[in-house]
Amino acid sequence: MMNITLSADEELVKKAREYAARQGTSLNRMIREYMEQLANIPETDEIAEEFALLAKQKGGASPEGFVFDREAAHKRNTIA
């Protein structure tokens, strides 16, 4: 594991620690988990490649016999 040093306003750190405590964790753990999330976000190129592959596989076609119903698509749920 590697240690890092961050610079932040003292009041900001205090508030962040208080928030973490209310969540039942530490600021250190929250920052580490956030960094893990950032590291696992797929790159734009990867997302575009996946989209292109799915578009080719699925072909963008509706099931046979499908008829678009504009009213059903725009129907709103209302409380009677």
Image (cartoon, rainbow, N blue to C red):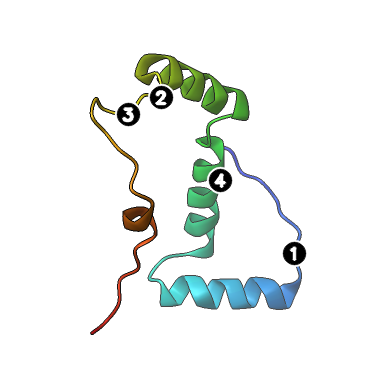
- Of the numbered discs 3 and 4, the one sitting upstream in the chain is 4
In the picture of the structure, the residue carrying the numbered disc 4 is 35
Residue 57 pos. (x, y %): 37, 15
Residue 56 horizontal side relative to residue 12, left or right: left
Left or right: 32 in relation to 71: right
How much space separates mark 2 and mark 3, taking CA atoms? 7 Å
Task: State the residue in front, 31 or 48.
Answer: 48
Mark seen at residue 73 = none
Viewer-closest of 3 and 65: 65
Residue picked out by circle 1: 8
Q: Does 1 appear above or below 60? A: below
Q: Secondary structure at mark 4?
A: helix
Which residue lies at the image location 56% right of the left edge and 24% below the top edge?
A: 48
Which amino acid type corresponds to the residue marked 2 in the rendered image?
Answer: Gly
* Quadrant where the image shows the C terminus: bottom left
Q: Earlier in the sequence, mark 4 or mark 2?
A: 4
For marks 4 and 1, give the CA distance: 16 Å
Locate residue 32, reporting x and y percent: 52, 49
Which of the numbered marks, if any, corresponds to residue 60? 2
> Residue, x 47% and y 22% (percent of image)?
50
Which one is in front in this view, the residue at disc 4 or the one at disc 1?
Answer: 4
List the residue tagged with mark 3. Answer: 62
Q: Assign a secondary structure to mark 3.
A: loop
Pointer 4 local density, CA inside 10 Å: few below 14, some 14–19, many at least 20 = few
Density class for disc 2 (Cα within 10 Å; few <14, some 14-19, many ≥20) is few
